[in-house]
Image: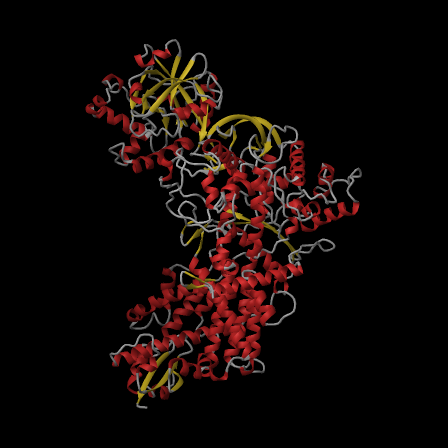
Amino acid sequence: MATESGKSFARRDRLLEIEKKVRGWWDEKDVFRAEPCEGTPKPGEKFFGNFPFPYMNGFLHLGHAFSLSKLEFAAAFHRLNGANVLLPFGFHCTGMPIKASADKLAREIQKFGNPPVFPKEAESVELQPEPEDANSGMPPEKFKGKKSKAVSKSGGQMFQWEIMRSVGLSDVEIAEFQKPEKWLTYFPPLAMEDLKDFGLGCDWRRSFITTDMNPYFDSFVQWQMRKLKDMGKIVKDKRYTVYSPLDDQPCADHDRASGEGVQPQDYTLIKMEVMPPFPPKFKALEGRKVFLAAATLRPETMYGQTNAWVLPEGKYGAFEVNDTDVFILTERAALNLAYQGFSKTPKQPSCLAELTGYDLIGLPLKSPLSFNKVIYALPMLTILTDKGTGIVTSVPSDAPDDYMALQVLKAKPAFREKFGVKDEWVVPFEIVPIINIPEFGDKAAEKVCLDLKIKSQNEKEKLAEAKRLTYLKGFTDGTMLVGECAGMKVQEAKSLIRTKLIETGEAVMYSEPEKRVMSRSGDECVVALTDQWYLTYDDLEWKKLAEECLSQMNLYSDETKHGFEHTLGWLNRWACSRSFGLGTRIPWDPEFLVESLSDSTIYMAYYTVAHFLHNEDMYGNNKTHRIRPEEMTDDVWNFIFCDGSYPKSSKIEPSILNKMKQEFTYWYPFDLRVSGKDLIQNHLTFSIFNHTAIMAKHHWPRGFRCNGHIMLNSEKMSKSTGNFRTLRQSIDEFSADATRFSLADAGDGVDDANFVFETANSAILRLTKEIAWIEEVLASEASLRTGPPSTYSDRVFENEINIAVLTTKKNYEKCMFREALKTGCYDLQAARDEYRLSCGSGGMNRDLVWRFIDVQTRLITPICPHYAEHVWRELLRKDGLVVNAGWPTADSPDETLKAANKYLQDSIVLMRKLLQKQIMGSKKSNKKGAPAATLTEEKITGLIYVNEQFDGWKAECLNILKSKFDRNTGTFAPDGEILEALQKSSAGQDANFKKVQKLCMPFLRFKKEEAIAIGVQALNLKLPFGEIEVLQENSDLIKRQIGLELVEILSANDHDARAKAGSFSSLLDQNPPSPGQPTAIFLLSNR
């Protein structure tokens, strides 16, 4: 028995032994090998599912496994259901992360030696980084919340060497990872082994890596890019792009350590000229034109400027834009501008003078469009220097923040004195009305601040609300009052005013990231104006095709659909070229590489023919290949994927070429792609675009299923906090099937799911106990009752099995795997346990027990295939493998029988509580948890009174509700209409109606809620089964469950029956029975 820290792991170890044995059976039969059948498959005959290949800069973790499990469960279900299934898996190596990490290692070795000796002062640094998204990157082998390893002094990040050590690599091994190729040969094979041990039903012949290390995939990507360019979908253009200065290239989503999805934010940079004479601090600027450069999103409001704002403690600089002009702004903004052509030296800001906000206060300014000929720079304490330029224009007529700041300066002389602000810089300046906004007038900021009773600049929440109220309405409904665009709507005037400011040289266009973006190389990104290759996702005709494709797809949730619709709304041109990293060279411009999101849009098609090219070598380097990389010409790719003409000049054997084409036409389109929801905004949408451009309509994708991220034990999965598990760690700790069980239980929607360690541990117990129970039952099979199912309990259990088969199938079909686990495992086992208790001395029926084991084994096969295979082959002694044994057959469920059994079980629970209450009412002792009958020495007779039909005022109420219920909408008429009908009924005519009404109203409310929940049957006067018959047939069960000597089932409407209750008959008046609610009376006598 294996033990760790004194704890037994025998059950887990048994599962691990079973899993190893079962994988041997699968390998022997090559069960997951996917081969096409002849002809075109009919709906449901084949299933092709795939998963975004993970990035190979580390080990696979539970974040990968969670998304992948959705595909694996779906594929396993379709295989079990008789479909021909293809589930392939590839490994992504394109892009920056591997190259950046390799280069980082090389720099550390160069600086600190091999093995490196890091600075001692860094060794005691406590690493407390921002929690890292667990969907990418390299996980340490063991994790702790606080790290005492060497930490880089720049940015508080671990050295790359230390990260590599933390995954268990030796110093000798780590040095080899200076070469990017080492990452490509090290991690993919380990990932493949982990997935095999996970039980992934994959055809591994089709696996491959990306980049030009794989010459076949390199050829495929080059063909794709040439085809898109020939179609006009790739163009060269100058555009604003998030850019890494360190890597000197654009930084796309997958190149980022943080800031995925962040786009460039465009501003108008207003040139506010500093009027001479210059102060002494500006001596180095003499002879230049000097401007405070203010970034604004609202150029149309510049007519109303009263001043400029600066942060007194802020750090600014005077930066050369060209030989004549100087911009004063923050260094961060200057760096962005330098990458946009506004620096004397491209990409290098040139600072002529370092300044603070104090140096700028009081500067006289001539600002474009302002009605005030001269305005002044004034202090504002709430300016953020990580946004914009640190210089802000002030328009108090329309900006609540500006209005409040100006009022404070005007009203507080001491505040002005503190910052050396002269009265003439502030006091003479009044609000300039420039825009009229319905409901707010021409001084919107003033009105909203007064309405919200804002007294101070520090009331941030109120000021945020003021901006929310005025900004959007000002843009959509505002009308210009001044300038050349007077009388025009603001939304029309905005672009015209901006264009004129830029054309006259009074402003320039400026862009920066919407939020902070960090590249995987560790630097903060800027926005650069780059001349590079772009995919024209902004093309309207192409967008229409994408929308058409999306409309035909199964997206499994409205949230996912809305995510795609939103992305299609904003998606613009996408930079598809890079100069740094790994990948495929752009064929017509080999200076550049294809970026990592652009080489992975239609590679699902590559899976269909990869086994012909790779010969089980994921790198494509096996010299025994029957097809050479150079033979995969554009004509060949077009023939296979695009119904192109037969490539007569090809040297590839015709039989192989035709077989490759047949594979593609059989498997395509793919039926399902499973992914995290974060890929909607890029990869998945790009996949739709590229399929519509390159593939025929009948090959467009059929389905995307998106999920949220996964938490561990209700906390974010994060390497830095230690709340993390690699896939290998989870398999070793819990076993593959217990991991899969917990992944299925974690959740199905697009919200974040929760992998709970206790669930995984419980799964170990559940699976091993079930194996033990099956072994025990089969060993004592002779003691089981033979013959066809005949008792009430038999019928109920058989019905529960039928229900489980049908509902679980529906759950699998909808990819609701948590629900499938509930109906196919939890609920079915609960029904089995209830059946065991119900059978009593007669015992369980042999045929039903065998059917239960068979059905439960198949239903759980997609989730726990190793367990199921063991039960199928070793315990049930079945031929073949359970993974393709077929979905179990079932009769239509008997809903009436199900309802009758629920009534029975609920009644038993209710009677047990009533008996305990009656006994405990006369006896003070309290044996918690003991059956009620064991609390007394006396014999107990149970009289169960039933009223099978509503009558009197209750019947009146139900008939009224039924007449006022709309079956189509599941709603009732207004309450007033129902009450009016009640008043007109015979119950309403009763002399004691007010008394009756007090009883009617709660009953009406209860029955309305019940009908809305379960349907119109809740309003029937009788239940769909005979209550007396059900209770009489199960009287022995009732006696046994409650501990009664005798039980009688009686009609509450029978006078003689009521007399049996003797002095307790008053209870029938206090608590009268009604349909579904029997009343039990217990009589005690000496034994």
Q: Determine the residue located farthest toward the left in the rendered image.
A: 414
Image quadrant in which the C terminus is located: bottom left
Q: Position of residue 463 (x, y in %)?
A: 31, 35
- Residue at the (40%, 21%) spot, across then down: 270
Of residue 751 and residue 960, the one placed in the foreground of this image is 751
User: Is residue 200 in view?
Assistant: yes
Q: In front: 122, or 846?
A: 122
User: Measured along the vertical axis of the image, is residue 357 above or below residue 789?
Assistant: above
**Colour option used:** secondary structure
**Place of residue 432 in the rendered image (x, y in percent of width and height, measured from the top left):** 32, 22
Residue extending farthest bottom: 1087
| 573 displayed left or right of 1068 | right
The one of 643 and 134 positioned closer to us in this rendering: 134
Name the residue nearer the viewer: 748 or 413.
748
Vertical arrangement, residue 577 with respect to residue 710, above or below:
above
Q: Please give the name of the residue rendered at 50% of the width and 78% of the height, measured from the top-left corner.
A: 793
Left or right of residue 9, residue 92 in this image = right
Quarter of the rendering containing residue 386: top left
Where in the figure is residue 244, as x and y percent of width and height? Answer: 49, 30
In this picture, residue 721 sits left or right of residue 107: left
Q: Give how far across and how far down residue 655 sits, in percent.
A: 78, 47
Q: Is residue 295 above or below residue 286?
A: below
The answer to whether residue 3 is left or right of residue 931 is: right
Work out whether residue 279 can be spotted.
Answer: no
